[in-house]
């Protein structure tokens, strides 16, 4: 045999062997007996990262009211309300009933108690031509029932019944505080108590309360008395207390009894002191004493944060006879502590206008209304024009009410519907 043919045949056989051997792993789909290999795939499993829940903000809704000024005609109304009730001398609750829902809705409610309660002395309400006040104890029962739980007493009428009358009033309110879980401040039995900064914890938020007075109607605490009232001119004490309170609490609220009565003008000295207080650490300043509603504003701090001042809340309740004394404001705001940063801020800041109404010149059926419940018809029937002794501004109408509000509560802060 030809060796080339033999070689060629051998090469051909070898090639065919390689071809068929290489195709042996390629099976035809559908051919009987064939199996389709399944490739197993392994997916990498990744665990979801665990995330901590974001802490919720802490929030406290605060409402406040101005001077609870119990004139003669106010407590005579309460006396009339009590008629026929066995064992009840005065019933003040109907006077406040129209605003009860507002006070009850707050987590914290602050009231400036303008008059003392000295049970051993005669009840007085600026009657007889003297601006001397001493209120019945039933006043306290009414405003506690209303929902107020913080009472500030730093005001110009503290010594209307002398040092003993003030001491008696402090003891009265301290007892009420123990019985009803209240916070009472502004007049103290001694220096040590004046340095005991009142802190109230609500919804996990600590709020410190401080209160200062501009004067005490020319009176002074006797040198041999331990009683203590911190005055506005004691700026070193105020600065120290605000800074201390700021370290102890999440928020600081200061009651400032200041200003000139019967005017809507904010004096430069109050603006200056308010700025100092805010930069020392006050978050909210609740002004009182002028018996008029005054403006309000944000005050920036040097560190970029800010506080808020109500220069005067005006009267909460009174029996005065000038129209500007009968329109007040109830501060209304939220204190919020950020759940992540722990920083404190104010939200929804504003004021609810209020109106003191009486039906005739005898101050009958005296009561306080929020603006949302007052009407042009009520304003038109107000007893102010017939009241005696007549004031300098005895006119009253719906337009006058709105004018006082528009001129003294900036639009951005008006809460007319609450």
Image: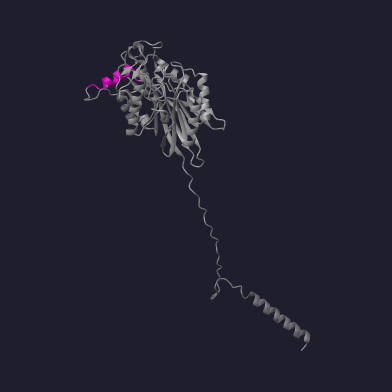
Confirm whether residue 368 shows in the render.
no
User: Residue placed at 53% from the left, 23% from the top?
Assistant: 272
Query: Considering the image in quadrants, where does the N terminus appear?
Result: bottom right
- Give the quarter of the image for residue 170: top left
The quadrant in which the C terminus is found is: top left
The answer to whether residue 35 is above or below residue 201 is below
The percent position of residue 338, horizontal first and vertical second, equals: 49, 39
Between 327 and 406, the one lying in front of the other is 327
Task: Tell which of 129 and 217 is nearer to you.
Answer: 217
- The chief SS type of the magenta part is helix
Q: Percent from the top left, x then y, of residue 282?
A: 49, 30
- 329 or 217, nearer to the observer: 217
Q: Residue at x 49, y 49 (%)?
A: 52
Tell whether position 149 is magenta.
Answer: no
Q: Which residues are magenta?
A: 70-83
State left or right for residue 391 relative to residue 282. left
Q: Is residue 178 above or below residue 24?
A: above
- Judge whether residue 81 is colored magenta: yes
């Amino acid at each position: 045999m030809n060796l080339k043919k033999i070689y060629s045949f051998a090469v051909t056989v070898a090639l065919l062997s390689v071809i068929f051997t290489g195709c042996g792993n390629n099976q035809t789909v559908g051919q009987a007996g064939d199996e389709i290999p399944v490739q197993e795939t392994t997916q990498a499993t990744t665990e979801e990262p665990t995330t901590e829940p974001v802490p919720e903000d802490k929030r406290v809704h605060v409402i406040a009211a101005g001077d609870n000024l119990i004139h003669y005609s106010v407590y005579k109304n309460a006396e009339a309300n009590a008629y026929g009730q066995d064992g009840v001398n005065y019933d003040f609750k109907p006077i406040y009933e129209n605003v009860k829902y507002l006070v009850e809705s707050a987590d914290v409610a602050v009231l400036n108690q303008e008059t003392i309660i000295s049970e051993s002395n005669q009840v007085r309400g600026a009657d007889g031509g003297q601006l001397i006040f001493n209120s019945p104890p039933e006043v306290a029962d009414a405003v506690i029932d209303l929902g107020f739980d913080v009472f500030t007493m730093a005001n110009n009428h503290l010594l209307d019944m002398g040092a003993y009358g003030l001491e008696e009033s402090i003891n009265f309110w301290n007892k009420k505080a123990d019985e009803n879980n209240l916070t009472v401040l502004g007049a103290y039995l001694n220096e040590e108590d004046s340095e005991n900064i009142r802190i109230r914890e609500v919804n996990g938020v600590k709020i410190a309360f401080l209160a200062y007075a501009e004067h005490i109607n020319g009176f002074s605490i006797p040198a041999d008395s331990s009683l203590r009232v911190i005055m506005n001119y004691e700026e070193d004490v105020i600065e120290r207390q605000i800074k201390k309170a700021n370290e102890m609490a999440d928020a600081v609220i200061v009651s400032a009894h200041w200003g000139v009565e019967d005017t809507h003008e904010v004096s430069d000295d109050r603006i200056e002191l308010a700025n100092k207080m805010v930069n020392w650490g006050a978050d909210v300043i609740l002004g009182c004493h002028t018996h008029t509603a005054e403006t309000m504003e944000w005050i920036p701090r040097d560190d970029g944060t800010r506080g808020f001042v109500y220069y005067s809340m005006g009267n909460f309740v009174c029996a005065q006879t000038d129209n500007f004394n009968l329109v007040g404001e109830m501060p209304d705001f939220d204190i919020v502590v950020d759940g992540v940063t722990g920083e404190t801020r104010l939200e929804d800041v504003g004021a609810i206008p209020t109106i003191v109404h009486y039906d005739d010149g005898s101050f009958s059926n005296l009561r306080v209304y929020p603006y949302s419940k007052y009407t042009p018809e009520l304003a038109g029937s107000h007893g102010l024009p017939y009241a005696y002794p007549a004031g300098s501004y005895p006119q009253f109408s719906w337009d006058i009410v709105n004018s006082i509000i528009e001129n003294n509560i900036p639009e951005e802060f008006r809460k007319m519907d609450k």
